Image: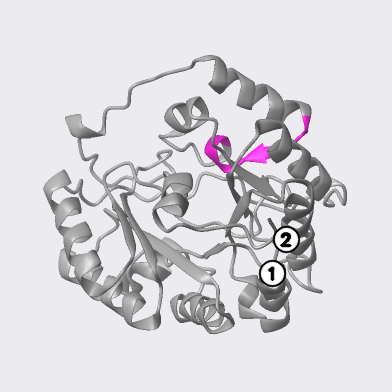
Amino acid sequence: MENTTTHVKRPDWLKIKLKTDGHFNEIRNLMSSQKLNTVCEEARCPNIYECWSRKTATIMILGDTCTRACGFCSIKTGKPPIYDEMEPVRTANAVKEMGLNHVVITSVDRDDLKDDFGATMWAETINQIHRMTPDCTVEVLTPDFQGYLPSLNKVFEARPEIFSHNVECVERVSKKVRSQSIWQRTKSVLQASIEFGLLTKTGLMVGLGETDDEVLATMQEMADLGVEIFNVGQYLQPTKDHLPVDRFVHPDVFAMFKEKGLAMGFKVVESGPLVRSSYHADEQAKMYAVKSNHA
């Protein structure tokens, strides 16, 4: 349904410099040859030019069709096709060919896979990357697997170096932003990761109707839970059919979020208008001195 809310003019600080050098084309060609999807393309990430030029990408497994329809996300929704059982091997091959030291893996929601919601494919992908590229650290940005603990444990037991699952927004606006998800279930997924002993990360978008105080309260709640890495970025409306932008947050406010977040106890806080879940993920891993569990 088309959104008719008044358009908010995009400020100058959100202008993006386009850069398509040899590395950009290399990544694009490699993903195409391995028949892999990237969230960089599917979610229309504003940082695709910067990240691909730095030879970093977030690989999206389990197809390009999501069973949910979140109001902020441009990934297509519907009934997904049967997944490819060789995708974990192709993903690991791409990571090896790219010569990565750190990789981020994500996926669409697969609520149609009633046995484990895709967790087996997740675990196999992590295992294949660790097997083929032992020095490469693996960060996973997972769906919630409907909070099903056996599925979560399959992913945990594959020992990703960083487990990430986004709260996406403050709790008050959650039903508007992602009607098929449950905010407290998201929190329970993060808590399960922390209790398992994994380095845990989350993040949210601003510009969806929240207040600064609500952002800070959410950050404090995540810090108290034991989350160690937190990202805050500006929501950008991908098409006219998605939720409108409520406000554009000034860079000074993002700087305040970072300062207060570090004081709360987070080890790493990425906060800025163009920050996304995997933005500078390789640098975050270095900052945190993350080492592969399989080297």
187, above or below 133, in the image: below
- What numbered label is drawn on residue 155? 1
The residue under label 1 is which amino acid type? Answer: Val
135 relative position to 72: left or right: right
For mark 2, what is the residue? Answer: 122
Element marked by disc 2? helix
Q: Position of residue 227 (x, y in %)?
A: 41, 73
Q: Position of residue 289 (x, y in %)?
A: 45, 57
Instruction: Find out whether the residues at labels 1 and 2 contact each other: C-beta distance under 8 Å.
Output: yes
Give neighbour class at mark 1: few <14, some 14-19, many 20+ (Cα, 10 Å). many
Q: Residue at the spot x=49%, y=49% of the render?
A: 73
The residue under label 2 is which amino acid type? Answer: Trp
Give neighbour class at mark 2: few <14, some 14-19, many 20+ (Cα, 10 Å). many
286, above or below 150, in the image: above
Q: Residue furthest right?
A: 85
Q: Position of residue 41 (x, y in %)?
A: 56, 34
Element marked by disc 1? helix
Which region is colored magenta? 34-41
Q: Nearer the viewer, residue 184 or 260?
A: 260
